[in-house]
């Protein structure tokens, strides 16, 4: 008998992330990767990090190397309060809980709320690693279609919705769709949450990477306008996209009844997030350099999004439809019906360009002809060349299964 | 209705860690803490960490700040292979999987193996944070008594054992008992694991902190002597106790059928462990300084264990029974029957000394008169004074509930 029959049975098979599987490929010489959601490498403020880390470790080793508190280092919690204040969150529901990336915050919420068979409501297409987390706790996922204003409301009534325990939404420049949820939808979602006693978590990794349009307030801010809503929504975010993913520092703002449970669970999961990373992040945020850093990031990503859009239009014309996100890292595109982007990827890979086929972002079966293109880590020349290679792959035909 | 009724119901209440609850107290002026399992602060090799971190961040920012691979940074995996080779593990079952502290490795194994109601076998008394993890996955814990040779065998037959999916054992200088499992017991446990198809995970955070006696080979090493055993055992460890807890770097050596599942789960949990921490740890291990560091640690902890033992004997005489661990950070003591060490803690706290009452380390009810004393973070003078305060607390009487 195979030992593997001794592993826990799962309602749904665990899927490996298509994105992470492609990461190794991204480093092949000559490869242009539109696959990952990696922040641009040239942005890292590495000299400042170097100086801060050297000082921290030499002069305050206890703070960086010793055990810390489960909820997070107080110095970073203070810096996070200042950070979210700049995002208009002036009265966070509780002290920030520091997590090992926002990914862990999603897992913590899943473990706090979900019993096997409970429903999680999320956008369709969905953030892949959140799909993985919800699969890990044996949740059923109710995928809600999105339009240019975000998750479509009212939510589709039925037995699945009746079992909902959690709504998970990426409100700004969603991964993979690039869509931002409108203020009206956010308010309507909050009213629904209060009426149905379902907790809504807003995941906002990209909100500060806005290069067009106007910001929409966070759910925890809008909750002030909806009676009772402050008990039913939370906010999670990360320093990964705005500063450095390698730190694995995320945070969660949650009402106390959720925060207390989450802290207990986190204690069992990894005791606390690296004190070195937390103290380093706190010191960086205290320098005030994030403002300038974000300005450079917005400019860079705006230019790259524009370059990709122009290339797609110029080289593929009517063969492609895509949105124009106002921020973030991703553009969502659809090719002619019948084209299978998994087949396209296999050929594109040989030609030196990779992306993520759209089907990867659907819990159930999704459209075969969609693809997610990340514009963050390639410069305009590379983006132009990437689209040229995509066209070559398309021109060869034979992409209908 | 309370929102909290919307949280997932649990088979067992989640307990907060008594140790972590005491941590805040440990910083009160004049307090001598025998409560935590903290490595001695004066040991940290902070200048070297400072230099290495400055160089890493200035010259290789991509390696420290960008996303990494879920299984871990290859450079740290190589350093871990060398580290465990020094522990006699010459043929690890697979590439090391890097985790966010060994705590996460335990959680990963729990999530890979346990369905609600499955049994985890562990020593009694038990490592508190492992109890928390197993409670989090709704496991039933079968606590096995230990003597001076470790977990007592044969394991107690019955319906609980029949549902066993995992054996969790801290083999060297167990927390809290200080006991090391003998070679004979390890081999017997492996034979049982093969016969019953139950996976055994050895948690070894303290093995290198041996200041007396002779090392016993790891289960994954001894597995070579038991046909089929290499499929049924794994090894997890951490840099927390031998280098710096703040890095949150642990690792797991697992047979491929387990490792593959674990990697999928970790991807969903936190994508990967901090690349900054991993690359820094790898560079530190490459310096070869760990050898000298561990020699200093062993000498220091040996002296402190001796000082605590001598003080206990001299000041409390026959009122206390305790073991003499050959390594690690903890000494397990029992006071006269009828004394409640929770009541003792309340009074000792006022007198400026804290410890962890023994009952905290039992899933079910444990002896009221036991206590765990950590000797790692107090010097001999402080240890002597701590025992004097304990005696004062005891002398006042009124400690029987």
Image (cartoon, coloured by chain):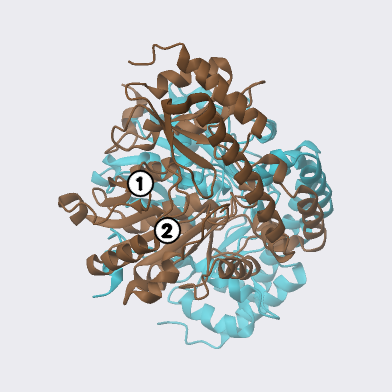
Chain colours: A brown, B cyan
Asked if both marks, 1 and 2, belong to the same chain, the answer given is yes
Q: Give x and y (percent) for residue A21.
A: 50, 29
* Depth order, front residue of A169/B70: A169
* Depth order, front residue of B12/A55: A55
The quadrant of the image that shows the C terminus of chain A is top left
Res A379 label: none
Residue A96 in view (yes/no): yes
How far apart in space, not on screen, are marks 1 and 2 (Cα)?
A: 15 Å
Note whether A336 is above or below B342 in the view shown.
above
- Residue A320 sits in which quadrant? top left
- Which residue is label 2 attached to? A202
- Residue A4 sits in which quadrant? top left
**B110 sits to left or right of B99:** left
**B336 sits to left or right of B85:** left
Residue B261 in view (yes/no): no
- Which residue is label 1 attached to? A134
| Residue under the image location 69 percent in, 59 percent down | A290
Q: Give x and y (percent) for residue B354.
A: 59, 74
Q: Badge 1, how many Cα within 10 Å: few under 14, some, many 20+? A: many
| Residue under the image location 23 percent in, 69 percent down | A195
**B199 sits to left or right of B21:** left
Tag 1 subunit: A
| Residue under the image location 45 percent in, 70 percent down | A221
Note whether A250 is above or below A314 in the view shown.
below
Tag 2 subunit: A
Question: Which SS class for mark 1?
Answer: helix
The quadrant of the image that shows the N terminus of chain A is top left
Q: Badge 2, how many Cα within 10 Å: few under 14, some, many 20+? A: many
Nearest to N terminus: mark 1 or mark 2: 1
* Depth order, front residue of B272/A309: A309
| Residue under the image location 51 percent in, 23 percent down | B225
């Amino acid at each position: 008998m195979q030992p593997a029959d001794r592993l826990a049975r799962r309602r749904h098979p665990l899927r490996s992330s298509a994105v992470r599987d492609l990461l190794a490929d991204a480093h092949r010489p000559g490869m242009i990767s539109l696959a990952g959601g990696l922040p641009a490498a040239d942005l890292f403020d590495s000299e400042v990090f170097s100086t801060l880390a050297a000082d921290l470790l030499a002069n305050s080793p206890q703070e960086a190397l010793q055990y810390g508190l489960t909820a997070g280092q107080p110095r970073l919690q203070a810096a996070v309060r200042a950070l979210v204040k700049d995002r208009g969150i002036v009265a966070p529901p509780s002290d920030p809980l520091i997590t090992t990336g926002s990914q862990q915050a999603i897992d913590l919420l899943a473990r706090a709320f979900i019993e096997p068979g409970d429903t999680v409501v999320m956008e369709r297409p969905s953030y892949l690693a959140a799909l993985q987390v919800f699969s890990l706790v044996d949740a059923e996922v109710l995928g809600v279609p999105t339009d240019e204003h975000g998750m479509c409301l009212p939510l589709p009534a039925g037995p699945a919705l009746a079992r909902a325990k959690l709504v998970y939404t990426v409100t700004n420049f969603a991964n993979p769709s690039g869509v931002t949820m409108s203020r009206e939808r956010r308010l309507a979602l909050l009213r629904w949450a209060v009426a149905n006693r379902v907790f809504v978590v807003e995941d906002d990794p990209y909100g500060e990477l806005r290069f067009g349009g106007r910001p929409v307030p966070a759910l925890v801010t809008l909750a002030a306008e909806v009676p009772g809503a402050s008990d039913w929504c939370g906010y999670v975010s990360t320093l990964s996209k705005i500063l450095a993913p390698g730190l694995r520092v995320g945070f969660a703002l949650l009402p106390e009844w959720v925060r207390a449970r989450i802290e207990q669970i986190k204690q069992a999961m990894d005791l606390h997030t690296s004190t070195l990373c937390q103290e380093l992040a706190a010191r960086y945020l205290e320098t005030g350099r994030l403002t300038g850093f974000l300005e450079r990031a917005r400019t860079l990503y705006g230019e790259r999004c524009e370059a990709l859009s122009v290339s797609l239009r110029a080289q593929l014309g009517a063969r492609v439809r895509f949105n124009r996100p106002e921020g973030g890292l991703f553009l969502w595109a659809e090719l002619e019906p019948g084209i299978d982007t998994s087949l396209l990827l296999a050929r594109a890979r040989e030609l030196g360009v990779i992306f993520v086929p759209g089907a990867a972002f659907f819990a159930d079966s999704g459209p075969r002809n969609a693809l997610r293109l990340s514009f963050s880590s390639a410069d305009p020349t590379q983006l132009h060349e990437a689209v040229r290679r995509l066209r070559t792959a398309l021109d060869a035909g034979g992409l209908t299964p």
